[in-house]
Image (cartoon, rainbow, N blue to C red):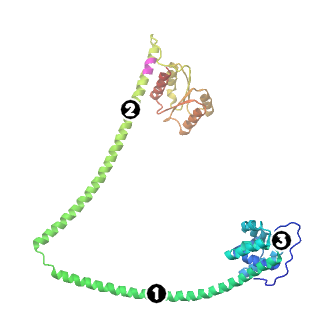
Amino acid sequence: MCDLTRKRFEPPQQTAKRRLKVWEVDRSYHCAILGTCLTLHELKKIIRQSGIILDPRASDYDAHRALVSVAGQDGHSARLLTRLLDKKYQRTIAQLMRLSDEKLLGDAWQKAIKTGDIAGPFWTLVTHPHMSEALLDQIYGEVHMLSHLEGASNRADLKRLVRLEASVASLKADAIKQAHQHQNQLRQKQQFIQQLEQQMLVQISRNIPQQTPAEIELNEQLLTLRRELAVALRQLDRTKRRLGSATQRAEDLTSELESSKQQLKETEAEQRAIELALGEMLCDASSVNPEPTGSLCGRQVVYVGGRTSLSPHFRALVEKFQGQFEHHDGGVEESRANLHCLLSKADMVFCPIDCISHDACLKVKRFCKRNAKTFIPLRSSGLSAFAKELSDITANKH
């Protein structure tokens, strides 16, 4: 404790019943408050925040004393202290501030003494607006004596710690000595075991009968057969692995074959569509003028990407089915602004995925989805793919 002298407590004049700030509390309590209610880490934090300058070689007691000296002044340091203490013990403050009877406050303090948790109740009661001087003297005295008891207990613990450290050092020395002894004994036992094993081997070699030349030859043949068997097993394992790889390769080839068959079927269907379309175009040129197999009913068809050289054939095919055709190269030479205008007028949009940039294809697809336009991706830019899709559309429409 920094100050063992208690001065008579004279609370500040106040009209409202409120808790006291730390600078309003009797200065003789400041040492007990800081030493009991705050940790050393918290004290040093307040010192840093307050801008109090200490010698780099200052001790913990110097830090404690420096903060005690400014706790009684209404300044930045004292306000930081009050704020930290109120925040740290806000739950205890909320509980005890509901009490106004001196007996109930004394009972709450005795309960804190029994449980050993006195820091929060001590700060709350020292600043409580309904505390009497007699109860404050009692609380201060008990905290003061607890600090003495704790100091005596710490000194006893230090003495006990010194004795224990000496005992531990002695026990470590004994343990090291015993470990060396055990290692020597173990080494001797291992040497004795090795000697016994050598004696047993000598005795066994004397009792084993000599083998005949035929037996020696049979043993050599058996050893050779075992080596050959090991080699054969390794070769079998490698063969199994190669067989597994070959089986997987065969499955992959089968899958590729099925995919090729499916592509062939699609190509044949496209060729049939071309033949039908070309047949109708040929019929158009003859005197016989049969009805078309389907009609686009004047709908606008926009073809984005592909090969520009095929555009006239696409146009002829669409007009054959009574539709309107427009082509845009996807932004290679033509303006993309013009593409937006064409897409706005389109009823359906064809886009070959093998002859257009990925970015342009995605933009066209998003535009169609956003504006409820029919988007038809083509797997190739050839006439056959376009003719097949167009035939399917007109057939379904028909």
Give the quadrant of residue 10. bottom right
* Residue found at x 39% / y 85%: 183
**N-terminal label among 2 and 1:** 1
Residue 22, relative to residue 154: is it above or below? above
**Distance from the alpha carbon under mark 1 to that under mark 3:** 61 Å
Asked if the residue at tag 1 contacts the one at tag 2, i.e. Cβ–Cβ closer than 8 Å, the answer is no
Image quadrant in which you'd find residue 140: bottom right
How far is disc 3 from disc 2 in space, using C-alphas?
Answer: 92 Å
N-term mark: 1 or 3: 3
Amino acid found under the numbered disc labelled 1: Ile
Which residue is disc 1 drawn over? Answer: 176
Q: Is residue 17 left or right of residue 213?
A: right
Please, what secondary structure does the residue beneath circle 1 have? Answer: helix
| Residue at (84, 73) in percent of width and height | 24
Viewer-nearest of discs 3 and 2? 3
Seen from this angle, which residue lies furthest top?
287
At numbered mark 3, what does the secondary structure look like: helix, strand or loop?
Answer: loop
**Distance of mark 2 from mark 1, alpha carbons?**
86 Å
Q: Position of residue 324 (x, y in %)?
A: 56, 22
The residue carrying mark 3 is 75
Give the overall secondary structure of the magenta segment. Answer: helix
Which residue does the numbered mark 2 point to in the structure image?
264
Q: Is residue 342 above or below residue 59?
A: above
Camera-side residue of 328 and 392: 392
